[in-house]
Image (cartoon, rainbow, N blue to C red):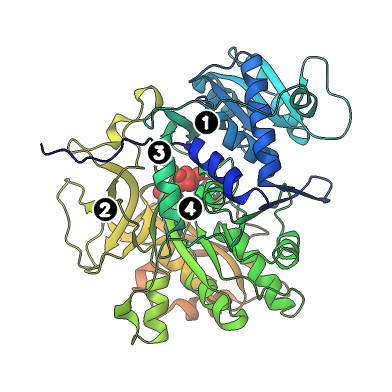
């Protein structure tokens, strides 16, 4: 090999920390606190507090490679842990506060967490499992209000005792930086360990103009939780570029978010579709109430963004949605639905179709899809198969060696998403393999039906799932949430769907619900719907269209 003569400079989070201090010390970090008040700080102040935190953790016995967990909402102190823990050579494990205590116990034990930094408001949850996690030596309580139990430590008091200087070490870029667990809807949650290298490369990719496009002039609002897949890398992207950060704390209702977006002149926000459906409904009700003129784009992903929502934001409110796909197993952004030059002359409908696909891969992510027998499928926009990915921020194995069946012999990760890919490389998710509906051996896309139903003016949310059927094995059932003061008849919904889909795709029943049950990360929880309604067609004599 004729070697290059360039430096082996490690890609580590420590560089982000030094950079933000050196160049963007005055940059703002704004957090909404539990009591709804607004907390303001700067990156400069945050750097010093991250140094204090690193000193405190060393004093508590945390060594390189040790796991430090957080049980926290999105706020500046959570960012301190994001910066200090990996940069000192330890590993940040963000616990998902929406999980059941038994799952949290399992995850914290599996990750061997030694210290947990926990928001005061989440102590009741922590107390349900932490005593059963043998590795946990200290609980540190984050909050300003009141005394902390003698068995625990107070975050502020702990930091106050420490010096504002910490010698952040030079680390190997391949060393572990963060751990996130998959949601575990099938089997136990599995740990994914992001390296410094994967995190830094992902951060840079997220900032690219054609990915989420983040720069110093931006004000970024990560609605997506920091406990879920690193909030899509948004906090690190803001730190890298010096963008202003705005954190919503625990207040994720549409009104609180709209207030923050307008009040802080947010230019870029990211979150799952269920959050944005609520925001769109509110904007439709009171279009003039919030000034969102600073907003340049809203990244929506985590589950399929309905085209009617993308169009509604654009046409009625002049707001651009960027649809993105990703997974915990990949740091997490994989593909983004950006228009390209070739779409310049396309009709509005064609452009919407592209923008509501899951998009094409971001640089360094590679994709392919395969049939049941493992054959690689053509990119023809029709052939459906399981999406496989590889790249520098794609998992190569789960923590503890679990889930070996998710990796192919030739080095690809099997996503569990059933997709088509068109000739231009745009990927479309038809379903997660566990949500696929098979009626009489024929496959029905729940996502397509949901998108069509959510385009009906009376429908706020629609989740289509498989009901067991005596003759056809499975038939589609639709759970529907009406918009405020709106409703439609079943016949109207059927007419709305007719002509768009083959007749056998028509749901057998429409079930009106108050709210579609959600997963811990705000996606529609179809397993719960199946549990509640999945047997309703099993009565004798039921027939289908
Ligand atoms: P969870 O298992 O809690 O949903 P992940 O965030 O890792 O955790 O889920 C990744 C999965 O979410 C993907 O495999 C895919 O099924 C789904 N997903 C993510 N983004 C999109 C999107 N834009 N459209 C459709 N599905 C998506």
**Which of disc 3 and disc 4 is earlier in sequence?**
3
- The residue under the point 58% across, 37% down is 82
Residue hosting label 2:
367
- Within 10 Å of disc 3 (Cα), the crowding (few <14, some 14-19, many 20+) is some
- Within 10 Å of disc 2 (Cα), the crowding (few <14, some 14-19, many 20+) is some
Secondary structure, mark 4, is loop
Toward which corner of the image does residue 19 lie, by quadrant?
top right
Q: Does residue 155 sit above or below 372 in this rendering? A: above
- The residue under the point 78% across, 36% down is 121
Q: Is mark 3 within 8 Å of ligand 1?
A: no
> Which label belongs to residue 539?
4
> Which label belongs to residue 11?
3
Residue hosting label 1:
86
State which mark lies toward you, 3 or 2: 3
- Residue 520: in sight, yes or no? no
Q: Does residue 352 sit above or below 88 in this rendering? A: below
Horizontal side of 127 relative to 85 (left or right) equals right
- Within 10 Å of disc 1 (Cα), the crowding (few <14, some 14-19, many 20+) is many
State which mark lies toward you, 1 or 2: 1
Asked whether disc 3 touches disc 2, contact meaning CB atoms under 8 Å apart, the reply is: no
Tell me the CA gap for discs 3 and 2.
24 Å
Toward the viewer: 189 or 26? 26
State which mark lies toward you, 4 or 3: 3
Toward the viewer: 63 or 27? 27
- Residue 34: in sight, yes or no? yes
State which mark lies toward you, 4 or 1: 1
- The residue under the point 32% across, 78% down is 341
């Amino acid at each position: 090999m004729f070697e290059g003569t360039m430096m082996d400079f490690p890609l580590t989070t420590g560089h982000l920390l030094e950079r933000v201090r050196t160049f963007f010390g005055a940059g703002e970090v704004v957090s909404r606190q539990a009591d709804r008040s607004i907390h303001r700080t700067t990156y400069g102040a945050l750097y010093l507090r991250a140094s204090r935190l690193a000193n405190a953790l060393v004093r508590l016995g945390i060594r390189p490679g040790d796991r430090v967990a957080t049980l926290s909402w999105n706020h500046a102190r959570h960012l301190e842990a994001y910066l200090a823990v990996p940069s000192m050579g330890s590993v940040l494990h963000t616990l998902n506060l929406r999980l059941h205590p038994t799952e949290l116990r399992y995850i914290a034990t599996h990750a061997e967490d030694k210290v947990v930094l926990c928001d005061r408001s989440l102590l009741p949850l922590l107390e349900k499992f932490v005593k059963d996690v043998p590795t946990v030596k200290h609980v540190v309580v984050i909050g300003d209000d009141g005394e902390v139990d003698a068995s625990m430590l107070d975050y502020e008091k702990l930091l106050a005792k420490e010096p504002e200087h910490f010698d952040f070490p030079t680390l190997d870029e391949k060393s572990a930086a963060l751990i996130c667990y998959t949601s575990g809807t099938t089997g136990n949650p599995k740990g994914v360990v992001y390296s410094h290298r994967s995190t830094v490369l992902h951060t840079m990719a997220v900032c690219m103009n054609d990915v989420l496009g983040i720069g110093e002039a931006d004000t970024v609002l990560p609605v997506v939780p920091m406990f879920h897949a690193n909030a899509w890398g948004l906090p690190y992207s803001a730190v890298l570029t010096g963008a202003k950060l705005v954190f919503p704390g625990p207040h994720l209702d549409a009104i609180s978010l709209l207030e923050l977006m307008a009040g802080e002149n947010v230019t870029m926000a990211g979150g799952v579709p269920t959050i944005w459906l609520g925001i769109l409904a509110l904007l439709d009700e009171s279009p003039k109430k919030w000034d969102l003129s600073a907003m340049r784009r809203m990244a929506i992903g985590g589950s399929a963004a309905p085209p009617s929502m993308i169009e509604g934001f654009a046409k009625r409110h002049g707001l651009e949605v960027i649809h993105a796909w990703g997974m915990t197993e990949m740091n997490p952004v994989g593909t983004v639905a950006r228009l390209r030059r070739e779409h310049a002359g396309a009709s509005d409908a064609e452009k919407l179709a592209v923008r509501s696909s899951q998009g094409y891969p971001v640089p360094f992510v590679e994709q392919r899809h395969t049939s049941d027998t493992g054959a690689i499928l053509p990119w023809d926009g029709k052939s459906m198969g399981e999406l496989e990915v590889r790249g520098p921020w794609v998992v190569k194995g789960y923590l503890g060696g679990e889930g070996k069946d998710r990796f192919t012999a030739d080095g690809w990760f099997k996503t569990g998403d059933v997709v088509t890919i068109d000739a231009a490389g745009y990927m479309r998710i038809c379903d997660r393999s566990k949500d696929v509906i098979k009626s009489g051996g024929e496959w029905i896309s729940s996502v397509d039906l949901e998108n069509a139903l959510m385009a009906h003016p009376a429908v706020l949310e629609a989740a289509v799932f498989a009901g067991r059927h005596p003759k056809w094995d499975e038939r589609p059932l639709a759970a529907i949430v009406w918009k405020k003061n709106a409703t439609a008849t079943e016949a109207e919904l059927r007419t709305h769907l007719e002509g768009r889909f083959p007749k056998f795709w028509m749901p057998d029943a429409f079930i009106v619900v108050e709210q579609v049950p959600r997963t811990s990360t705000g996606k529609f929880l179809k397993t719960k719907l199946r549990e509640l309604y999945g047997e309703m067609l099993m009565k004798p004599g039921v027939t289908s269209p």
